[in-house]
Image: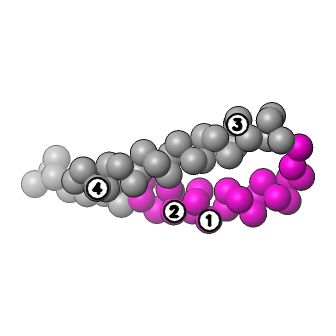
Amino acid sequence: MESFEKIMYYLLSGYLVLMLFLYPSLVRITVHQELVYTALPLLGWLVLTAYYLVRWSGRRRG
């Protein structure tokens, strides 16, 4: 991964960890609010993870 891609991936991962595990214990939010705040970043994280895995496996084969 290039450095910019790594930084963005780590920031997105950190955001998801904070929103899924730390934030609900600090602030009372409903399940619906938590889903709203995490659905799109989680989808982006899954897409980036799949992209990096495909790119990595392509380099290992070729």
What secondary structure is found at the residue carrying circle 2?
A: helix
Q: In this view, does 7 lie above or below 37?
A: above
**Residue 59 in the image, given as x and y percentages of width and height:** 16, 52
Residue at figure coordinates x 46%, y 48% from the top left: 11
Residue nearer the viewer, 28 or 41? 28
Residue at figure coordinates x 71%, y 59% from the top left: 37
- Among the 4 quarters of the image, the one containing residue 34: bottom right
User: Do residues under tags 2 and 1 come within 8 Å of each other at their CB atoms?
Assistant: yes
Residue at figure coordinates x 60%, y 40% from the top left: 17
Q: How crowded is mark 3: few (under 14 residues within 10 Å), some or many (20 or more)?
A: few
Q: Which residue does the numbered mark 4 point to in the structure image?
A: 4
What is the C-alpha distance between the residues marked 1 and 4?
20 Å
**Residue 5 in the image, given as x and y percentages of width and height:** 31, 56
Q: Residues within 10 Å of mark 2 (few under 14, many from 20)?
A: some
Q: Earlier in the sequence, mark 3 or mark 2?
A: 3
Q: Which residue does the numbered mark 3 point to in the structure image?
A: 21
What is the C-alpha distance between the residues marked 2 and 1?
6 Å
